[in-house]
Image: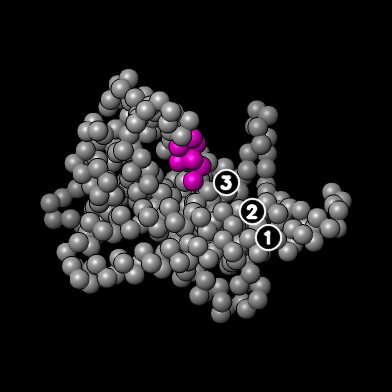
Amino acid sequence: MDHPWIFYLLGQKVNLNTLIMAWAGMAVVLTLAWLSTRNLKVIPSKLQVVGEGFFDVCRGITMATAGKRGDGFLFFIGSLFLFILTCNLMGQLPLKLISIPQGELIAATGDINTTSGLALVSFFFYICFGIKKKGLRYFQHYITPNVFFLPLNLLEDVTRPGSLLIRLYFNILVGEILSGIALKSAPYVLPSLVIFLELFVAVVQAYIFAILSSVYVSLLSDDHH
Amino acid sequence: MALDPQVAAAAALGGPLAVGLAAIGPAIGIGLMTAAYFNSVARQPEVQGNLTPQYFITLGVVELLGLFGFVSFYLLFGKI
C-alpha cells in the first residue's frame, strides 16, 4: 500500500494496483452474468439458479426500500451491489502470491479512489433520477419544511456520498490491515480466522452500500410528501 | 519530513486512544439494536423480512460513528 504501482495518463496519476483489481472484478461480474443468462429456460440450469438467486437479493433490496417503484432503479442498485460484492470478496483471495513490480494487490474497494467514484455515481444517480421522476419539483425538497433548512439540506448532499465512501473504504482497509497483522503475528492460524470475519464484512458492506443508495434514491424520487 | 518529537508522541498516544474511545458508543448502540432485533423476531417471526433491511440500514449509520475514530487514527498516523 505504501508504494503503489502508478503510471501517468494525460497528466493524471493512475493507480495500477486498483485498476487491475477493479477490471478483474468487472470481468468476473460480466462473465458470470453472461454465463448465467446465456440460454434461459423455464426449468433452469444450475448457473441460472445462481443468477436468479442474485437477482432476488438485488430485488429484495429495492423492494424493501421502495416497493414496486424500486423496479425503476433496480438495474443501478443491482450492478452496484454485484460490483462491490465481487471487489470485496476478491480482496480475500491469496493475492500476495502474485508479484507485481511495485506494491501489492489489495481489494479494489480498499482504495479511496474507487469508493469515491462509486459514491459519486450514487450521488449523481439519485439527483438525476429524482429530477427525472419529479421534474423541477425535485428542488423543492431543499426548502422543506421551510427556507431556513436550506443549509442543512445542502449539507446532507455532501454527507450522504461522504458517509458512503468513508464507510466502505475504511471497513475494507481495516480488514486489509488486520489480515496483514495476523499474517505477521501467527501465520496459518490467525489469517484463516480473520478471513472468515472479512468475508462477513465484505457481504455486509456491499449490502449496506446498496441499501443506503436505494434509500436515498427512493426518498428523493417519492411523490407522496 | 522531520517532525517535532512532542507532536509525534502526542499522535502516537492519541491515535489508538481515538480508535478505542470511538468504539464505545457504536458498540453500545449496535448491542442495543441487535438485542431489540432478536427480541422482536423471536416474539413475532413473520416480521423478519421487513425488519432485516431496516436493521442493516441502521447498522450502517451506527457503524460509521465508530469508523470516524479510525479515520482520525489514520490521519494522525502520518504524523508519527
Callout 2–callout 3 Cβ contact below 8 Å:
no
Q: Is the magenta stretch mostly helix, strand or loop?
A: helix
Query: Could you tell me which secondary element the residue under label 3 belongs to?
Result: helix
**Residue under pointer 2:** B72
Chain under callout 2: B
**Residue under pointer 3:** A112
Labels 2 and 1 positioned on one and the same chain: yes
Q: Quadrant of residue A222?
A: top left
Q: Is residue A219 magenta?
A: no
Task: Find residue A74 and report its horizontal and vertical position in percent.
Answer: 28, 41
The residue that appears at 49% across and 35% down in the rendered structure is: A155
Query: Relative to residue A225, is residue A5 depicted above or below?
Result: below
Query: What amino acid does circle 2 point to?
Result: Ser
Q: What stretch is highlighted in magenta?
A: A155-163
Task: Find residue A145 and report its horizontal and vertical position in percent.
Answer: 34, 31
Task: Find residue A42 and report its horizontal and vertical position in percent.
Answer: 12, 51
Of the numbered discs 2 and 1, the one sitting upstream in the chain is 1
**Residue under pointer 1:** B15
Query: Relative to residue A63, is residue A138 depicted above or below?
Result: above
Extreme residue in the left direction: A42
